Amino acid sequence: MSGSHRGGRSGAALEAGGNLDTIAGDTTSLDNKVAICNTDAIVVSSGAITETNSGTIAGDTTSLDEKTPTLGVTTSANASPSVLASDDAQLGSVGAGADVDGNIHGQLRYIGESVDALPTSLGQATAAASVPVIQASDTPFGRINAKGNVPVVITIADANSTQSAALPVGNYIATSNIDVAIIVAANPTATAAYDKLWAYSYRRVVIGTANDKVAAIRLVASTGTVTLTLEG
């Protein structure tokens, strides 16, 4: 066979260019993508792979042991710490100014400053150290305009009949802290036979004539007061 070659491949020339150049171009994306492997750590036998670094891995991860507790653990020693972001807009910074609708730190400061002026203890007697209480002007006992916008008080100091000051015409609420008998007249003197006003109850008293008075006499051996409040 003229022109044929028989024998080994030793006489064959390696292919240059052609497909080898194409293959080289197509595989450039693999360059340096396979890192050096520690082949001593991998044993391949009959298609099976045995991993021999488990002990090292276990040692390297001991810091993770028991860091995720079971549900319901409440002590700090058995809990995973949570760190809040220092720039959280809703929390705001520590020491933020008081702001009723601002961030959480600002709202907490607003609450603290709002209650800071409350009395430090119960039993304060002075006005400067007390929380003011304003009685509504439209309540039955609050519509006070007799004798310069204050109730008219009859002080019962003994067993004698005691008169009030002269009263304007109107309907009054009479209250007392002791049992008394009361009467209305121009110059009245009360006796035990008149209308009864029991302690811590009330009666309505009508002053039909200007400058009439109310007289009261006690029914018990105590001192006390009768208060007359003009209804509006």
Image: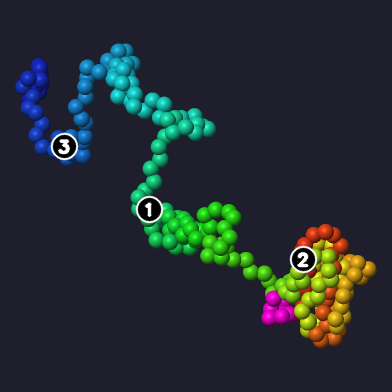
Question: Callout 1 environment at 10 Å: few (<14), some (14 to 19), or many (20+)?
Answer: few
Judging from the image, what secondary structure is the residue with disc 3 in? helix
Judging from the image, what secondary structure is the residue with disc 1 in? loop
Judging from the image, what secondary structure is the residue with disc 2 in? loop
Instruction: Give the residue at the far top of this rendering.
Output: 46
Task: Check residue 157 in the rendering and tell me which mark sits there, or answer none.
Answer: 2
Q: Nearer the viewer, residue 167 or 68?
A: 167
Placement of 180 over or under 109, stated as above or below: below
Q: Does 179 sit left or right of 76 as displayed?
A: right
Q: Quadrant of the N terminus?
A: top left
The residue drawn where x is 77% and y is 64% is: 224
Task: Check residue 23 in the rendering and tell me which mark sits there, or answer none.
Answer: none
Q: Does 27 sit left or right of 231 as displayed?
A: left
Instruction: Give the residue at the far right of this rendering.
Output: 193
The Cα atoms of the two marked residues, 1 and 3, are separated by 62 Å
Q: Nearer the viewer, residue 169 or 13?
A: 169
Q: Quadrant of the C terminus?
A: bottom right
The amino acid type found where label 1 is placed reads Val
Placement of 156 over or under 112, stated as above or below: below
The residue drawn where x is 21% and y is 39% is: 29
Camera-side mark, 2 or 3: 2
Residue interval drawn in magenta:
144-150
The Cα atoms of the two marked residues, 2 and 3, are separated by 122 Å
The amino acid type found where label 2 is placed reads Ala
Task: Check residue 94 in the rendering and tell me which mark sits there, or answer none.
Answer: 1
